Image (cartoon, grey):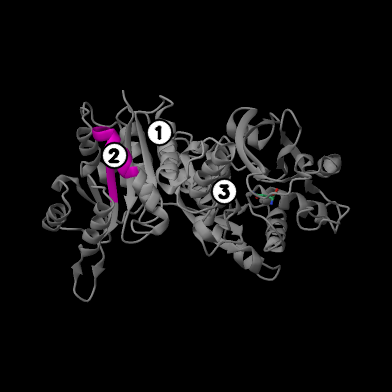
Amino acid sequence: METKYIFVTGGVVSSLGKGIISSSLARLLLARGYRVTIQKFDPYINIDPGTLNPYEHGECYVTVDGHEADLDLGHYERFTNTQTTRANNVTTGRIYQSVIDKERRGDYLGKTVQIIPHITDEIKRNVKLLGNTGQFDFVITEIGGTVGDIESTPYLEAVRQLRWELGNSSLCIHLTYVPYLKAAKELKTKPTQHSVKLLQQVGIQPDVLVLRTEHDIPMGMRRKVAQFCNVAPEAVIQSIDAPTIYQVPLMMHEQGLDDFVITKMGLECKQEPNLDAWNHFLEKLSSATKEVKIGLVGKYVELQDAYKSISESLSHAATYNDHKLKLVYIHSEKLTDKEVDEKLSEMDGVIIAPGFGQRGIEGKFVAIKWCREHDIPTFGICLGMQCIVIEFARNVLGLTDANSSEMDSKTTNNVIDLMEEQKGINNLGGTMRLGAYECQLHPESKAAKAYGKTIVSERHRHRFEFNSEFRSRFEEAGMKCVGENPKTHLVEVVELPEKRWFVGTQYHPEYQSTVLEPNPLFMDFIKAAIKYSEEKNK
Ligand code: GLN
């Protein structure tokens, strides 16, 4: 079938959850047998979010093909169980870079290069890139930012043109906010009306309005919105706060969002979506009563979006192990030997978070030492794995000045060192070891048993690695290098086999955990944590 394009815009305020609405619609269309992908345009000038501080937009997600992406791509993958690539996340920086490169090559044949048509054409080309692969029936394009923002304007102009060109093969969903005024005890739709007006002013008539709300919006009020905004009454849908984001596809389906979209685009609603596996997950999620308590030691604890993929992976794993996840964020900058006992002794398992730079690193060593000595299930990811190695070097091998050359470029005990291929790289953007690489696991390792196989592929984002010069000393003292890259022998996984569950991975398994396919390593870690908690409480 000819590819259909769905545009998702937002108005009134940001953070309404366009990513969740896009993902939910994608889940419903997939459940009806369509092939769907979601793409996001971010209106900032950065080429990608790889150089951004997590405080800006939360975690940096990594795709299989090594693109550093907006965290919404994580939602897309977790909801759709389909991998995304570089083409699924484009920024204004990328658009301009490509146009400027073409200008330098002389591709524009002496013409003046302008926002319209050159920037808008480049945006349109990027929208169609995914559709033109022939792999998808639907391409859902989320436009970052809010209608009315200066920086979103070229994107909306591109959407206007595409809608004109594509006719019935395109559709626009606009997400707005309906505030509740406590004093007046009233829901207010005026901001929605204004936001739709703004969209109409740039030549876009939305087909569907999704109203974010904290209170049920009465039918009469929805009909009023429909009338004011030239939208069919059945296409005014509410998105009310849900106990879990994974409930949103069902809420959208109950209100007929997928039916409306399919019919509006001239397709037939043949079958009901098959949501059996999805519902199975939701049932487990709501019926779990026992709790598994995991501490996450990291430096971005004020901002939970900084560890989004990790917290979601833990939640998937807890759910499939019939437990509720209680995730406690522990500030690594504030963790010292004095309070570590109080902070960690209640935990059933501890995650040592990924990260960059010196800040908060000493607290991670404190946590690791405590977990190792108390034999708590412990899982170090990327920098977390590197810290597990450094702590072991300092406190078991007796190399008191052991460090990563990221933190101390002069130490002779550089047990974590800059990768050879990284030496001489000056630019920070897009230059790490990124994306999926294979890892060969020792058959007797906890990791191999968790995956049920010895060759796995996981995603990466790092510059530093385990320094193999020290490998035999570690192994003799009990820290085993049980996973390595089959070609370069880069150490990917370390374990303390004597402990209950003590594993560090150079890769990021959290980028490959979805609702329908939880990551095996997270599953095994949570299993170990539950077992430990049962032992404790005996
Ligand atoms: N800073 C470390 C490195 O670059 C770890 C990176 C990470 O945790 N993603 O190797």
Tell me the magenta residue range.
159-174
Q: Tell me: 273 left or right of 108.
A: left
The residue at which mark 3 appears reads as 529
User: Dot 1: what SS?
Assistant: helix
What is the magenta segment's predominant secondary structure? helix
Q: Amino acid at mark 1?
A: Lys
Question: Nearer the N terminus, badge 3 or badge 1?
Answer: 1
Q: Position of residue 265 (x, y in %)?
A: 23, 33
The residue at which mark 1 appears reads as 128
Mark whose residue sits in front, 2 or 3: 2
Query: Furthest-front residue in view?
Result: 110
Answer yes or no: do the residues labelled 3 and 1 have beta carbons within 8 Å? no
Q: Amino acid at mark 2?
A: Arg
Magenta stretch encompasses residue 519 = no
One can see residue 275 in this view: no
Q: CA distance from mark 3 to mark 1?
A: 46 Å
Q: Amino acid at mark 3?
A: Ala
User: Dot 3: what SS?
Assistant: helix
The residue at which mark 2 appears reads as 163
Q: Position of residue 298 (x, y in %)?
A: 61, 59
Q: Quadrant of residue 40?
A: top left
User: Dot 2: what SS?
Assistant: helix
Q: Quadrant of residue 36?
A: top left
Query: Furthest-right residue in view?
Result: 412
Quarter holding the N terminus is top left
Question: Nearer the N terminus, badge 2 or badge 1?
Answer: 1
